[in-house]
Image (cartoon, rainbow, N blue to C red):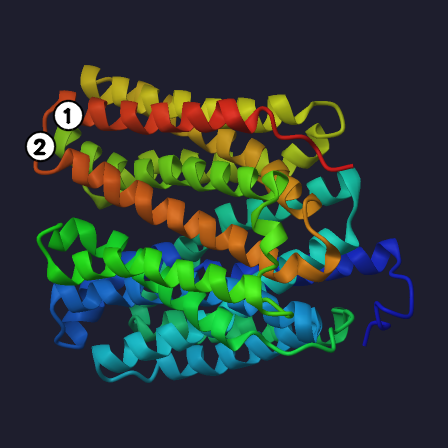
């Protein structure tokens, strides 16, 4: 086992091993997303489930992750990030293995939710370790590799998982994931050092009110598209959001050991990059949902052709993210964050122009610009968030950042799809992409003012 981080220094070689380990663990959690989405019709057929039910195979874990992530991050702050990471990963491996045995859609959704909740512990713990172990340009480089792995691993999942699912069935995806996660867990056991634990209690009232408010918000956003504002469940959820968050704020101000320090939420150096990241990811992922619709409706493409056209975006995302940290040694945040998000905005506008004019090459250029821009800004925006926090709040702080990204993603996808509605004209698609581009441009203006941590 690695030496205790609280008593022994971590060498440069050990830091690299830790980074490789957590990157491998993150890839194990994220690589099945794309191929699982493509497998939903087959899963629904095998389990005799409706389209609405099978959609929850993807939706329910996202909601669970959004609720659990900031709370799970606090567990690492309180009890040590090694303990939180290994505990979350161990439970996740078990749930993934059980997922492959599901005989009904209900069991499959339940195991997926449990795996997502357990996996939500590992993300903030891993990012907290990266932020605490790496400083300055080394941290930006490490976060660049983190972002690149998140971007490229789903593409690898399509290449590996797709053929195996065709041969052996959808259960093979979860068997493979459980096996890879078990390897990642073993590596982590011998590599990841312990961090200092805090001798304080866990803020249960804060966790309940924050979790309830986040679930109500994410549920309302997720169901707004299919159910509409006329749905009583959506209206009730929207009404409960301010109630739960106000209760959360009241609890945090009155407790001596808050889940989220109120001072952190009043700190503009923390709140601003989180908000900018939420808007940027909303524009990025909104385009991710609408672009395939445009390619199908306006160009008549099938699944394979759409996948090939979309492929440059994650590839350019991953490649630019892997080099973004090195660029941070020569370029300012104004260029990397502001310029990166502006490239994302320009890419959205180009996709809209391509949809309106019928030129496929313009859409491809827009996808490339979006991927490059997202890869450039993400590591430095994350570094800005990390630099705004005390070491003892890294887990809950990075958890809140990831919750903000999930909120922005869900909002961007829901809003852009709602604006498009049932329209299929080139002008309608151009309008949607222009709106996404304008939102990203606004985030670029604010993001260009974010300072690099000392």
The crowding category of the residue bearing disc 2, from other C-alpha atoms within 10 Å (few below 14, some 14 to 19, many at least 20), is: few
| Label 1 close to label 2 by CB (< 8 Å) | yes
Location of residue 408 in the rendering, given as x and y in whole percent from the top left corner:
39, 45
Residue at image position (56%, 66%) is: 254
The crowding category of the residue bearing disc 1, from other C-alpha atoms within 10 Å (few below 14, some 14 to 19, many at least 20), is: some
User: Left of 399 or right of it: where is 136?
Assistant: right
Considering only vertical position in the picture, is 201 above or below 256? below
Name the N-terminal-most of marks 1 and 2.
2
Q: Which residue is mark 2?
A: 423
Location of residue 198 in the rendering, given as x and y in whole percent from the top left corner:
73, 73
Q: Quadrant of the C terminus?
A: top right
Residue at image position (56%, 61%) is: 253
Hey, which residue is sitting farthest top in the picture?
357
The reply to whether residue 301 is visible in this rendering is: no
The reply to whether residue 284 is visible in this rendering is: yes
Residue at image position (56%, 80%) is: 90
Q: Quadrant of the N terminus?
A: bottom right
Residue at image position (58%, 65%) is: 73
């Amino acid at each position: 086992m690695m030496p205790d981080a609280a008593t022994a220094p971590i060498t440069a070689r050990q830091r690299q091993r830790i980074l490789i380990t957590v990157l491998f663990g993150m890839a194990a959690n994220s690589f099945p997303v794309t191929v699982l989405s493509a497998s939903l019709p087959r899963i629904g057929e095998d389990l005799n489930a409706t389209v609405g039910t099978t959609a929850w195979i993807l939706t329910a874990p996202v909601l669970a992750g959004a609720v659990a992530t900031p709370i799970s991050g606090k567990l690492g702050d309180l009890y040590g990030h090694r303990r939180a990471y290994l505990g979350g990963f161990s439970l996740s491996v078990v749930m993934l293995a059980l997922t492959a045995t599901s005989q009904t859609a209900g069991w499959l959704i339940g195991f997926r939710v449990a795996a997502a909740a357990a996996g939500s512990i590992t993300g903030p713990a891993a990012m907290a370790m990266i932020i605490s172990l790496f400083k300055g340009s080394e941290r930006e480089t490490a976060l660049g590799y983190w972002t690149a792995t998140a971007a490229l691993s789903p593409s690898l999942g399509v290449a590996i998982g797709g053929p195996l699912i065709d041969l052996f069935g959808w259960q093979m995806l979860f068997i493979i994931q459980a096996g890879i996660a078990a390897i990642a867990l073993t590596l982590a056991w011998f590599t990841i050092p312990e961090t200092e634990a805090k001798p304080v209690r866990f803020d249960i009232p804060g966790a309940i009110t924050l979790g309830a408010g986040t679930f109500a918000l994410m549920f309302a956003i997720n169901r707004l598209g299919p159910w509409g504002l006329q749905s009583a469940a959506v209206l009730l959820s929207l009404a409960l959001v301010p109630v739960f968050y106000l209760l959360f704020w009241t609890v945090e101000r009155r407790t001596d050991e808050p889940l989220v320090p109120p001072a952190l939420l009043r700190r503009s150096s923390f709140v601003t990059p989180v908000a900018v990241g939420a808007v940027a990811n909303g524009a990025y992922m909104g385009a991710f949902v609408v672009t395939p619709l445009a390619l199908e409706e306006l160009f008549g493409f099938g699944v394979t052709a759409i996948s090939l056209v979309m492929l440059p975006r994650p590839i350019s995302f991953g490649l630019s993210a892997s080099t973004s940290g090195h660029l941070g040694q020569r370029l300012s945040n104004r260029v990397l964050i502001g310029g990166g998000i502006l490239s994302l905005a320009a890419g959205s506008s180009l996709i809209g122009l391509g949809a309106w004019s019928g030129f496929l090459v313009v859409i491809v250029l827009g996808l490339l610009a979006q991927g490059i821009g997202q890869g450039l800004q993400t590591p430095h925006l994350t570094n800005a968030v990390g630099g705004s926090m005390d070491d003892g709040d890294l887990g809950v702080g990075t958890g809140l950042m990831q919750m903000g990204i999930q909120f922005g993603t869900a909002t961007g996808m829901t809003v852009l799809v709602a604006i498009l509605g049932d329209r299929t004209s080139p002008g309608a698609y151009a309008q949607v992409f222009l709106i996404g581009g304008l939102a990203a441009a606004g985030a670029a203006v604010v993001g260009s003012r974010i300072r690099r941590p000392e």
